[in-house]
């Protein structure tokens, strides 16, 4: 009997395989970045197809196979519909997803990255976020992710931003230090 792992995860990307299956890249709370297959998800009658869309946040049940994870069930927690309907917000989500896919290697959970990712996307899904707030949010999120992965050096200014939670009051300060932040990233 296989052990079933229960975790929450953010769908970073997907690729179609065979007739109705998919391979998903998922950043999970308990397992880190994993690659998982899901059978029959592209069929019209599939109950999983709405929960496992790209850039969705879901509760996922997984079983470890010989060489790959397999998804047994999933429940959608948030599809970030408002953020996905706006071009700039969707682009931000896609770029951050690519960043995580590029720099996170293997199954190594990091709760800081997972929590920052979900908090930022919940903020992005808000109706009162304008373009400058989105830019500041992206700078802050990428800075925090790269720091968690060990790519940011010692800088008192950056450390102050890294240690603070996402906050609209930081917008002006982040945008003022934009060049410094991008240089360090």
Image (cartoon, grey):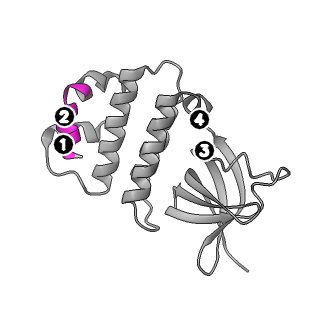
**Dominant secondary structure of the magenta stretch?**
helix
Secondary element at tag 3: loop
Nearer-N-terminus badge (3/2): 3
- Distance, label 3 to label 4, CA atoms, is 7 Å
Residue 40 visible at all: yes
- In the picture shown, does residue 54 fall above or below 165? below
- Distance, label 1 to label 3, CA atoms, is 31 Å
Question: Could you tell me residue 171's position as x and y percent?
Answer: 31, 24
From the image, tell me which residue sits under label 2: 179
Q: Are marks 1 and 3 in contact (CB under 8 Å)?
A: no
From the image, tell me which residue sits under label 3: 56
Q: Is residue 20 left or right of residue 120?
A: right
Front residue of this view, candidates 175 and 17: 17
From the image, tell me which residue sits under label 1: 183
Neighbor class of circle 4 (other Cα within 10 Å; few <14, some 14-19, many 20+) is many
Residue 80: mark in rendering: 4
Which circle, 4 or 2, is nearer the viewer?
Answer: 2
- In the picture shown, does residue 156 fall above or below 133? below
Nearer-N-terminus badge (4/2): 4
Tell me which corner region of the image, top left, top right, bottom left or bottom right, holds residue 181. Answer: top left
Q: Are marks 1 and 2 in contact (CB under 8 Å)?
A: yes
- Distance, label 3 to label 2, CA atoms, is 31 Å
Residue 124 visible at all: no
On whether residue 103 falls in the magenta region, the answer is no
- Distance, label 1 to label 4, CA atoms, is 30 Å
Q: Which residues are magenta?
A: 175-184
Q: Are marks 3 and 4 in contact (CB under 8 Å)?
A: yes
């Amino acid at each position: 009997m296989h052990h079933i792992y229960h975790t929450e995860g953010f769908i970073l990307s997907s690729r179609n395989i065979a007739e109705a299956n998919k391979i998903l890249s998922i950043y999970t709370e308990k397992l880190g970045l994993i690659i998982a297959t899901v059978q029959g998800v592209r069929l019209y009658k599939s109950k999983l197809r709405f929960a496992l869309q790209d850039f969705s946040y879901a509760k996922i049940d997984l079983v470890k196979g010989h060489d790959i994870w397999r998804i047994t069930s999933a429940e959608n927690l948030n599809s970030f519909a408002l953020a996905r309907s706006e071009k700039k917000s969707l682009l931000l989500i896609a770029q951050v997803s690519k960043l995580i896919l590029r720099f996170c290697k293997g199954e190594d959970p990091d709760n800081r990255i997972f929590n920052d990712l979900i908090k930022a996307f919940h903020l992005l899904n808000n109706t009162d976020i304008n373009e400058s707030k989105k830019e500041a949010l992206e700078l802050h999120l990428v800075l925090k992710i790269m720091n968690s992965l060990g790519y940011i050096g010692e800088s008192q200014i950056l450390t102050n931003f890294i240690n603070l939670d996402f906050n609209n009051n930081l917008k002006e300060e982040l945008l003022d230090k934009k060049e410094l932040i991008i240089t360090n990233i």
